[in-house]
Each structure stands twice: as structure tokens, then as C-alpha cells.
């Protein structure tokens, strides 16, 4: 069965293959897609689908999961084996999360659940083919006011840095990222570990599959997320980065989903949330492990339903957003401890990408250092860009970088200010005197993360550990750990004369992160 029509929409004509054994559904999909200007062929089984695929290529294949002679996955596997370029969309039974995850892992661009919402169907197909669906009406952006009605009203929060790391450009202005400026090109390092990361970026950028980035603070998770966005079909759309740990709990819903005028005191006009801002593009949820449980449920619902309801609105609006998330926590342990919803974890963790700590790829330090130096020198208007001397490189190569690339960046900022010449020498780096020597670094590499923390100075001596066997355990671990954290923050702040940027850098934290931790623990300048 085959039919075609002249393309109604802009752009090249795309030929699609729809595989479904139910004639009524086939007709429904066919009518919907023909109206969008696509050329179309259909098949009712795996074997019929394979026969069509062997005869010619398509822009995309849309297949039901359950077919009389096999599964839609058989078609996906065949396409993968043949190295074919078709984008694939899989239609799964409602509530069958396992199937959806399996399809995404098998390389599907995206999945839809039955009964298929035709508006969503059109959006997903357009997105797979890199066509921009019609833009939704623009709603005004205004700073959030006192959240009188959003969840539990409390006193107005202090003005703070926006949790959106970068304000997205208006949709109409969204342009392709020039290759020379793309996040992928900014990602320096040729170590095997970085090559592995690059290969994964290349693979996952071709689909809509959610990716969970795991890695210590400052390793480059956000840069990797941007690289995934820049390398995929959504590159011309917005990348919206949100630090989940930096938003006060009572504002979360309004920030994520937007609100309607009059929804609460201070809501003077409609405002879009992160989901609407990222519509058509990518929403990067940094520090996802810090999201409170109540908000986790709402986020899960929006991801599953692909729609959001702004605070104060009566109807839901569809959104087409790719979700990337990141955490430095062990999310499966958070699930086990009851602090993270298992179903949300399952949704976000379809593909896992570990960004290794800098000490595991220390051979990259020269290249990353040069690249970072170039960027910060340019920003500061310093020319020519100073080079790292051999002794500086040698020293950097022996340092364990607990704060990872961000710490390297901070070191180089300082060194640039101090050196004033063409070369940055070891002395300009201001590295602590207890830089690990080679033997320690080797031992560090061989350790499990918990043990590695001990080597970095967080752990205790053998006697202390022996004593620990007989010591009382804290009655409330969370309170105890808060006390320890408070004490360390105060020490770092005192050492850096209450300069939060410097104190944060010494602990491998960004300014945003230390500010957040200080607020959480109620530390103020008076302390
Ligand atoms: N491989 C790399 N090459 C060049 N610059 C890098 C690289 N990795 C990270 N950076 C830079 O290091 C800084 C920290 O990276 P990024 O913010 O992506 O880390 P992160 O893991 O998301 O941190 P956090 O967990 O604290 O949010 C950024 O300025 C980033 O551009």
C-alpha cells in the first residue's frame, strides 16, 4: 500500500514508512501525516516492513511495538545492523515504560504511547526530521514575585541569581551554533576516557532518549549536555539549563511550568516556565538529585504526558522537550534511601553517561589548560595569550584536582592575573603545598571513590578508624552531616576572608553552589 501527496509544508519532502497491523490506525496515521506534506508508505508486519526497507530508504520509520510476526524492535535492530540512517519512532502500549526504554536503548529517536495523541504525533515526527513545529504564542517573561499561591506560601524569597544558567535567546533568533563555537569543539582532551565520552555524545545526540550525566562537581557535565544538544537536530533550538538545587521549593512549580496572571499575589502577567522556554529544544536539569519528592512527581507527570499546566491555568499545553539531567550523587542510592522516586529515576536514566574526574584523565590537563587559558585570556582582553611553562604543566600533571576542570579554570584565572607575562610558571599557579606526588596519584587512581576521598584528606588514620569502631553513631545522620558541612564551609570562608567565590573554589564548588549551601545552612556574613 502506498500513497503520496504534494508537500504542503516548507522544506524538503520526507518519505516515511508506517508499520502497524491495525488497518484503522494505519489510515489514521496516514491521513495525519499526508496532511503535513509527507510522502508515505505503510506495512502491516515486520516482514512487509523489511521488504519495503530493503527496496528503498526513508527519512523515518514509525512502527508499532507489537506486530503479528515479531516486534518493532526487530526493525530497529535490522536498521542498526545495516547502518541505515532512518530515524525511528516506536509506538508502545500505554504504561509500558519498559518497552519505551528498550526502544530508546535500541536507538529509537523517540516513542509515543497509545492511544496516540495526534498533535503530539505530528510534533514528534517533525522533531525527528528536524522540522520546527509552529511556535506557540509567546508569553511575557517577568521576574517571579512573592509566591502567595504557588504551593505553600511563605515570605518572599530574597532576590537571587536565576537558576537558568543562560537566558535563552528568543525562538525567532535561535540560530545554528557555528561548529567552531559548539560545545563539542570546546570540549578539550584526547584521553581514551574523553574519546569514549565523545563517541557517546555522538551516539545519543541522534535520539530523544533521556541521558543522565553522572560525575563529580566541575567535571564538565553541563558542557557535555550542551555538546549533546549542539550535535543533534535540536541544535537550532534552545538549550535551557536549570540548577534544580538553587530554586526555593515553593517556587519550583511556577519556575518549571510557568503561571497565569492572577494565579497568586504578584503574578501580574502570564509567565512561561522552563518547559515552555525549552519547547522544541533541550531542558538540562542539573543537580536533579536535589529536587524535592513532591516536585519529582510533577516532573515525572510532565515527562510522561509531554504536557505542562502552568500554575493557575485550567488546561494543559503540549511541550516537546528533550530532557538531559545531571547529578554528582549516586541516584540509585538516593532511590534506595527513599529520597528519589524510582519511576523518575527509570525515566531519566535511559542512557547513562559518566563524565570522569580530571584525575582519571590527567593526561588531558595540558590541552584543557591551554583551551581554558585561551578563553579566559580572550574574555579578559589579554593578548597574546600566555602559555603554560613546562614546570607549570609538570605540577598540574601531579595535582589531583578535587574540584576538577572548574578548579583548573579558577587556578588559571588567578595565574593569569598574577603572571603578567608570556608564560605562566609553576609559582603562579598557587597550588597548595600538599600537591600529591606521583606515587600517591597512582594509588589514588586504584581506589574506590569512597577510599579516594580518604586519601584526599577527608578520611581518617588507622587509629581513628579503630576508635571509630567503638564510637557512638550519630542519632540523625542528616543533622550530623549538616553540622560537618557547616563547619567546613565556615573554615573555608574564614580562610578566604569571606570571599565566597574563592572559598567555593577551594572546595570545588561554584559560586552558585556555595551560595546555595550557605543559604541552606543559614550561614551569613555575620558568622
Ligand atoms: N573538557 C573540557 N574542556 C574545556 N573546558 C572544560 C572541559 N570540561 C569542563 N570544562 C569547563 O569547566 C567548567 C566546569 O564545567 P561544567 O560547568 O560543565 O561542570 P559540571 O560538571 O556541570 O559542574 P557542576 O556539577 O558543578 O554543575 C566550565 O567552564 C566548562 O566550560
Image (cartoon, helix red, strand yellow):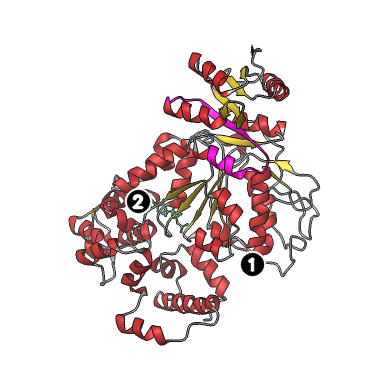
Name the one closer to the observer, 374 or 68: 68
> Would you say 507 lies left or right of 513 here?
left
**Percent from the top left, x then y, of residue 283?**
57, 46
The image quarter containing residue 306 is top right
**Percent from the top left, x then y, of residue 332?**
51, 59
Farthest residue toward the front?
69
Q: Is residue 92 magenta?
A: yes
Residue drawn at the location 79% of the way across and 49% of the way down? 313
The image quarter containing residue 410 is bottom left
Q: Is residue 322 above or below residue 337?
A: above
> Would you say 140 lies left or right of 353 here?
right
Q: Is residue 21 visible?
A: yes
In the rendered structure, find residue 138 and report the number of the disc placed on it: none
Residue drawn at the location 45% of the way across and 29% of the way down? 80
> Would you say 355 lies left or right of 39 here?
left
Q: Cβ(mark 2) to ligand 1 < 8 Å?
A: yes
The residue wearing badge 1 is 158
Q: Is residue 438 above or below residue 321?
A: below
Image quadrant where one finds the N terminus: top right
Among the two numbered marks 1 and 2 on one chain, the one whose residue lies closer to the N terminus: 1
Cβ–Cβ below 8 Å for labels 1 and 2?
no
State the separation of the CA atoms marked 1 and 2. 33 Å
Q: Cβ(mark 1) to ligand 1 < 8 Å?
A: no
Instruction: Read off the magenta span.
Output: 82-103
Residue drawn at the location 53% of the way across and 32% of the way down? 73
* Residue neighbourhood size for the residue with mark 1, other residues' Cα within 10 Å, grouped as few (<14), some (14–19), many (≥20): few
The residue wearing badge 2 is 372
Amino acid at each position: 500500500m502506498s500513497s503520496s501527496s504534494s508537500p504542503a509544508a516548507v522544506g524538503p519532502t520526507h518519505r516515511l514508512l508506517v508499520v502497524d497491523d491495525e488497518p484503522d490506525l494505519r489510515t489514521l496515521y496516514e491521513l495525519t501525516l499526508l496532511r503535513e506534506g509527507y510522502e508515505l508508505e505503510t506495512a502491516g508486519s515486520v516482514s512487509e516492513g523489511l521488504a519495503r526497507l530493503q527496496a528503498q530508504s526513508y527519512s523515518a520509520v514509525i512502527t508499532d511495538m507489537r506486530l503479528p510476526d515479531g516486534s518493532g524492535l526487530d526493525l530497529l535492530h535490522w536498521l542498526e545492523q545495516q547502518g541505515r540512517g532512518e530515524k525511528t519512532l516506536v509506538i508502545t502500549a500505554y504504561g509500558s515504560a519498559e518497552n519505551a526504554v528498550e526502544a530508546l536503548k535500541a536507538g529509537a529517536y523517540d516513542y509515543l504511547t497509545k492511544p496516540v495523541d495526534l498533535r503530539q504525533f505530528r510534533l514528534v515526527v517533525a522533531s525527528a526530521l528536524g522540522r520546527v513545529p509552529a511556535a506557540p504564542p509567546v508569553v511575557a517573561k517577568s521576574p517571579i514575585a512573592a509566591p502567595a499561591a504557588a504551593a505553600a506560601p511563605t515570605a518572599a524569597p530574597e532576590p537571587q541569581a536565576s537558576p537558568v544558567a543562560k537566558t535563552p535567546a528568543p525562538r525567532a533568533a535561535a540560530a545554528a551554533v557555528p561548529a567552531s563555537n559548539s560545545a563539542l569543539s570546546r570540549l578539550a582532551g584526547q584521553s581514551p576516557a574523553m574519546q569514549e565520552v565523545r563517541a557517546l555524545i555522538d551516539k545519543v545526540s541522534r535520539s530523544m532518549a533521556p541521558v543522565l550525566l553522572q560525575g563529580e562537581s566541575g567535571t564538565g557535565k553541563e558542557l557535555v549536555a550542551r555538546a549533546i544538544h549542539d550535535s543533534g537536530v535540536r541544535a537550532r533550538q534552545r538549550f535551557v539549563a536549570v540548577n534544580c538545587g538553587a530554586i526555593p521549593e515553593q517556587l519550583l512549580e511556577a519556575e518549571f511550568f510557568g503561571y497565569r496572571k492572577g494565579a497568586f499575589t504578584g503574578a501580574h502577567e502570564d509567565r512561561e516556565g522552563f518547559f515552555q522556554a525549552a519547547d522544541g529544544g533541550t531542558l538540562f536539569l542539573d543537580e536533579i538529585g536535589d529536587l524535592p519528592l513532591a516536585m519529582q512527581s510533577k516532573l515525572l507527570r510532565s515527562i510522561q504526558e509531554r504536557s505542562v499546566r502552568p500554575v493557575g491555568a485550567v488546561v494543559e499545553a503540549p511541550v516537546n522537550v528533550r530532557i538531559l539531567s545531571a547529578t554528582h550523587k549516586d541516584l540509585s542510592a538516593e532511590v534506595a534511601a527513599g529520597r528519589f522516586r524510582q519511576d523518575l529515576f527509570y525515566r531519566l536514566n535511559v542512557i547513562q553517561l559518566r563524565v570522569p574526574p580530571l584525575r582519571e584523565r590527567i593526561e588531558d590537563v595540558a590541552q584543557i589548560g591551554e583551551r581554558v587559558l585561551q578563553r579566559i585570556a580572550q574574555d579578559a582582553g589579554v593578548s597574546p595569550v600566555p602559555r603554560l611553562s613546562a614546570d607549570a604543566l609538570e605540577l598540574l600533571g601531579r595535582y589531583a584536582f578535587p574540584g576538577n576542570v572548574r578548579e583548573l579554570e579558577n587556578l588559571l584565572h588567578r595565574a593569569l592575573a598574577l603572571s603578567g607575562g608570556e608564560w605562566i610558571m609553576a609559582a603562579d599557579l598557587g597550588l597548595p603545598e600538599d600537591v600529591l606526588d606521583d606515587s600517591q596519584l597512582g594509588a589514588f587512581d586504584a581506589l574506590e571513590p569512597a577510599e579516594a576521598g580518604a586519601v584526599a584528606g577527608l578520611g581518617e588514620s588507622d587509629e581513628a578508624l579503630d576508635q571509630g569502631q567503638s564510637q557512638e553513631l550519630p542519632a540523625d545522620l542528616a543533622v550530623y552531616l549538616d553540622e560537618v558541612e557547616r563547619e567546613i564551609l565556615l573554615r573555608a570562608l574564614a580562610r578566604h576572608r569571606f570571599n565566597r567565590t574563592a572559598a567555593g573554589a577551594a572546595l570545588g564548588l561554584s559560586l552558585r553552589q556555595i551560595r546555595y549551601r550557605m543559604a541552606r545552612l543559614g550561614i551569613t556574613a555575620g558568622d
